[in-house]
Amino acid sequence: MMVMMKAAVFVEPGRIELQDKPIPDVGPNDALIRITTTTICGTDVHILKGEYPVASGLTIGHEPVGVIETLGSSVQGYQEGQRVIAGAICPSFGSYASQDGLPSQDGGCSCHGYKPMGGWRFGNSIDGTQAEYVLVPDAQANLAPVPDGLTDEQVLMCPDIMSTGFAGAEAGNIRIGDLVAIFAQGPIGLCATAGARLRGASLIIAIDGIGERLEVARQMGADVTLNFREVDVVEEVLRLTGGRGVDVAIEALGLQSTFEGALRVLKPGGTLSSLGVYSSDLSIPLSAFHAGLGDHKIITSLCPGGKERMRRLMNIVAAERLDLTPLVTHHYALDDIEKAYDLFANQRDGVLKVAIKP
């Protein structure tokens, strides 16, 4: 008799629903994780809206916290019953891209060439985490034990949001004393703000249009908050920096307006670190780009994954350098995930992140 589980499944654009699916079989390099907490990401909303295509019938979600239910025969160093997380990006570390230092792009190689973003498998190319169970491939490379004493909510941001936000600060190469502007203070932008503080920025300017998010940005390390509904952000950032511009601007939403604003506040030779998921073509304004002669850098990042990345992020939490539990604003049972999507996709009730518990 086939054993079934509940899972949030993409049916068609505008429709994700809870369905029964078989619990996956465990291969020698896999681990079956019983999910204790997961969440909904902005990327899942892009999938829901049909802005990012995935196969109909796919289980959505990529942020797992749980317990090892079954280990594959080749997986060593772990035990069943152990609390673990796995990164949203779960690369094999055996591909050309991984061995070239880009495990997030772990697409391997075929006669059709490389597959961008191939390291992002959960809820993209394989069944994801908004379910009672998830199968973690290449488990020995991707499972990270949760330190004793940390709650699910304390580590829930590590698989994606924290890793992505920090990647924006890291890719921007923020140095001690740098001036930094972060455009958009959703969950990823808030983590980018925290990452900028940990990297040693001396002035962190957080930008958003929602006052409550700007208050959280202060908690995450912002020195100045700007509401784009009340001030000309570009003008104000240039004033705050004495006309010099910022060393690093981080874009954390994926809109033309935020991308362009980030470009316009850069100093000559500054870096635009882009984290947003864009759903339409971008244009680069000639004046902000200085006709291509401004020595600017534009760099993009996909969430770094793997057990070592997760270990480092959980160390930050365990050492009390950063508390991301204020980002978890709502809690839902898996049975109510369609209601959770409705809340999150429409950004009601001050939602930042929701904890989904089977």
Image: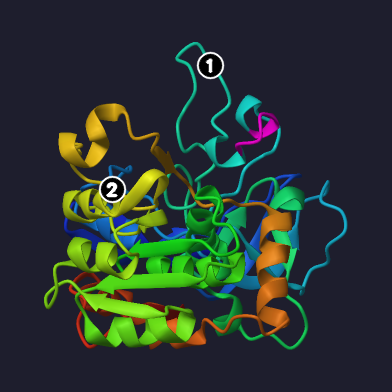
Asked if 327 appears above or below 127 in the picture, the reply is below
Give residue 263's mark: 2
Residue placed under numbered mark 1 in the picture: 110
Residue 354 occupies which quadrant of the picture? bottom left
Image quarter (top left, top right, bottom left or bottom right) of the N terminus: bottom right
Asked if 318 appears above or below 267 in the picture, the reply is below
Q: Are marks 1 and 2 in contact (CB under 8 Å)?
A: no
258 or 54, nearer to the observer: 258
Name the magenta segment's main secondary structure: loop
| Total residue callouts | 2
Q: Residue 111: x and y, percent?
A: 50, 11
Q: Residue 231: x and y, percent?
A: 14, 74
User: Which amino acid is tagged 2?
Assistant: Leu
Which secondary structure, mark 1?
loop
* Residues shaded magenta: 98-102
> Which residue is found at the position 63% from the left and 86% from the top?
151
